[in-house]
Image (cartoon, grey):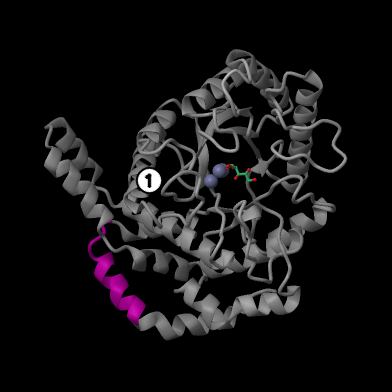
Amino acid sequence: MQLDKSAIEAHNEYLIKDHERRFNYIAAEVQDVEALLQKLIDFQVAIPSWALGTGGTRFGRFPGGGEPRNLEEKIEDIGLLHALNNSSGAISLHIPWDIPENATHIKALAAQHGLQFDAMNSNTFQDQPGQAFSYKYGSMQHVNKAVRQQAIDHNIEVIKYGLDLGSTSLTVWLSDGSCFPGQLNFRNAFQNTLESLQQVYSALPDDWKMFVEYKAFEPNFYSTTVGDWGQSLLYASKLGSKAYTLVDLGHHLPNANIEQIVALLLMEGKLGGFHFNDSKYGDDDLTVGSIKPYQLFLIFNELVEGMDARGMKHATDLGWMIDASHNVKDPLEDLLQSVEAIMITYAQALLVDRKKLAEAQLNNDVVTAQEILQQAFRTDVRALVAAARLRSGGALNPLAFYRQHDIRAGLINRRGSKSMATGL
Ligand code: AOS
Ligand code: ZN
Ligand code: ZN
Ligand code: ZN
């Protein structure tokens, strides 16, 4: 299903007057509005293939119908999102859930929708049918070398799939850890994991990055072998210059200062990218910006400041990915909301008066520093984000368009009300 461009034009025409009024108001407040709009246009967020269906908890799953049944349909769904917002021009695949049987065909299909392949994700947290060894007691940390080798081989296979599709990064998230004290020797688990990652790293093409994702807990509840940014940074530093830390916003202990972690990883040149989501308690994987929008803003504030200080290109020098799960919402609506939240927050962070902030910091003027940040955070930038979308051919209000055109009903018609996507 491809969206009809003329339907988007009609939608925009209907909303243009209101939009222009709001845009003119905010544009007059911004210093270089053209430069800001271009940054917004360039910024793309990758959609994870596993977030297109209804997620669930161990208590149940309530699919809403019309979920993508295969990789082609997942690409089609992301194509829909991208046609509406022009900011989701990439897909992050998960092996073995998305094995591309015919890479040339899959690549062409993605290109048809204007999509690139972002980081490839490996999976050594589940046992697959026919697999020789179980990951019940870990994968790369495992006491049995044969299990570790199986996990290494799988990751190398994922790199190969990625190469065929034009991806240039591998995200390794390990559920390895322990459930009870005494279950494993921490140092041995670390060393085994490091050695396994080194094997994968040595198979990494020169122009690839490896993202080492950390997570405080779940599914292991006593220890996790890549449990926090310190441990991830240790691995990434020992591995080499192609290895980086990946920050998933839901993977910290409560109240962690994520923006400070981001600032320091950037300073060390070791920040690889993000899994955006939001949470109240743990790895809740809720819609980006739905619970703690100010935290998200403070993270983007550090990103803009730190990337500019290092001369990095916002759009391309880090991996921007969503990692979410939808239990009660239509996944596509949720993803539209998440991307919008990211774009809004990025725009707000671009508005921060960096010169004045630096001055306030030098003068220990705490009040002014806070005012400067909150001034940007409290600015309604939605018309700027919409203007960027309009310029690149998207819809002024993607969510409204999605609903008015009853896109979910169309998907259910074509795929059935019981179709279920693979994912978490
Ligand atoms: C797990 O908690 C991590 O967030 C992973 O990044 C991700 O959810 C998983 O790899 C999806 O398959
Ligand atoms: Zn994640
Ligand atoms: Zn997670
Ligand atoms: Zn998560």
Relative side of 259 to 171, left or right: left
Say which of 322 and 41 sits in front: 322
Vertical relation: 380 (above or below) 259: below
Q: Residue at x 48, y 59 (%)?
A: 339
Amino acid bearing label 1: Phe
Asked whether residue 340 is in view, the answer is yes
Q: Residue at x 78, y 19 (%)?
A: 145
Tell me, yes or no, whether the highlighted magenta stretch contains residue 74.
no
Q: Residue at x 62, y 32 (%)?
A: 210
User: Residue 24 appears at what percent x and percent y?
Assistant: 28, 72
Ligand 2, by image quadrant, is top right
Magenta stretch?
Answer: 18-31
Relative side of 309 to 205, left or right: left
Residue position marked by numbered label 1 in the rendering: 300
Hey, which quadrant is residue 211 in on the image? top right
Q: Quadrant of the N terminus?
A: bottom right
The secondary structure type at the circle numbered 1 is helix
User: Residue 86 appears at what percent x and percent y?
Assistant: 53, 64
User: Residue 391 appears at what percent x and percent y?
Assistant: 46, 69
Vertical relation: 378 (above or below) 284: below
Vertical relation: 348 (above or below) 134: below
Tell me, yes or no, whether the highlighted magenta stretch contains residue 29.
yes
Magenta residues, dominant SS class? helix
Say which of 258 and 88 sits in front: 258
| Few, some or many residues within 10 Å of mark 1 (<14, 14–19, 20+) | many
